[in-house]
Image (cartoon, rainbow, N blue to C red):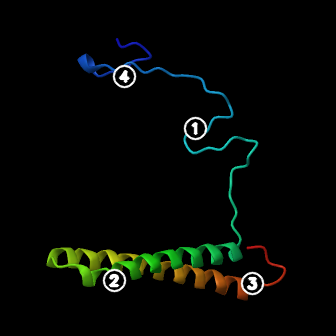
């Protein structure tokens, strides 16, 4: 019969040790009780984060598109176009999420807590 602290795998048994951690250490995605368990971002902050992220994404996309003219290898040109279009897509997603947040801010009643 296998011991209680071993994984029962026959000849390939692996010793499992369980350690006790201090209560203020982050384990498996749980926050300590003193910090709270959730993060709330307001809709206005979401708009700002989305705008900032969109600016960064579009900047990388423009940089990628502008560097295509200097390339001579056709495979490298195709890869650069894919890279630039990917960042342009990410910027468009950020703009869409910012627009949804803006719509939520505009349509929310003064007494609602979203």
Label at residue 85? none
Q: Look at the numbered discs 1 and 2 and tell me whether their residues touch, using CB distance below 8 Å.
A: no
User: Which comes before the other along the chain, label 2 or label 3?
Assistant: 2
Q: Can you give x and y, in whole percent of width and height, for residue 85 in the image?
A: 34, 80
Q: Is residue 39 above or below residue 12?
A: below
Nearer-N-terminus badge (1/4): 4
Residue shown at the point (64%, 76%) measured from the top left: 48
Mark 3: secondary structure: loop
Q: Are marks 1 and 3 in contact (CB under 8 Å)?
A: no
What residue did someone put label 3 on? Answer: 108
- Marks 3 and 4, how far apart in space? 55 Å
Q: Which mark is residue 7?
A: 4
**In the rendered image of this protein, does residue 21 appear above or below residue 56?**
above
**1 vs 4, front mark:** 1
Compute the Cα span from label 1 to label 3: 37 Å
Q: Which numbered disc, 4 or 2, marks the residue closer to the eye?
A: 2
Residue at 63% in and 35% down: 25
Q: Are marks 2 and 3 in contact (CB under 8 Å)?
A: no
Instruction: Give the label, 2 or 3, closer to the camera.
Output: 2
How much space separates mark 1 and mark 4, taking CA atoms?
22 Å
**What residue did someone put label 1 on?**
27
SS of the residue under disc 1: loop
Can you tell which of label 1 and label 2 is closer to the viewer? Answer: 2
Is residue 28 rendered to the left or right of residue 106? left
């Amino acid at each position: 019969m296998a011991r209680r602290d071993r994984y029962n795998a026959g000849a390939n048994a692996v010793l499992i040790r369980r350690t006790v951690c201090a209560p203020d250490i982050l384990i498996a995605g749980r926050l300590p009780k003193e910090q709270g368990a959730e993060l709330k971002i307001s809709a206005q902050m979401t708009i700002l984060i989305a705008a900032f992220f969109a600016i960064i994404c579009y900047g990388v996309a423009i940089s990628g598109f502008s560097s295509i003219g200097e390339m001579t290898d056709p495979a490298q040109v195709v890869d650069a176009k894919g890279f630039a279009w990917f960042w342009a897509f990410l910027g468009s997603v950020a703009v869409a999420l910012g627009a949804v947040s803006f719509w939520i801010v505009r349509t929310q009643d003064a007494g609602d807590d979203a």
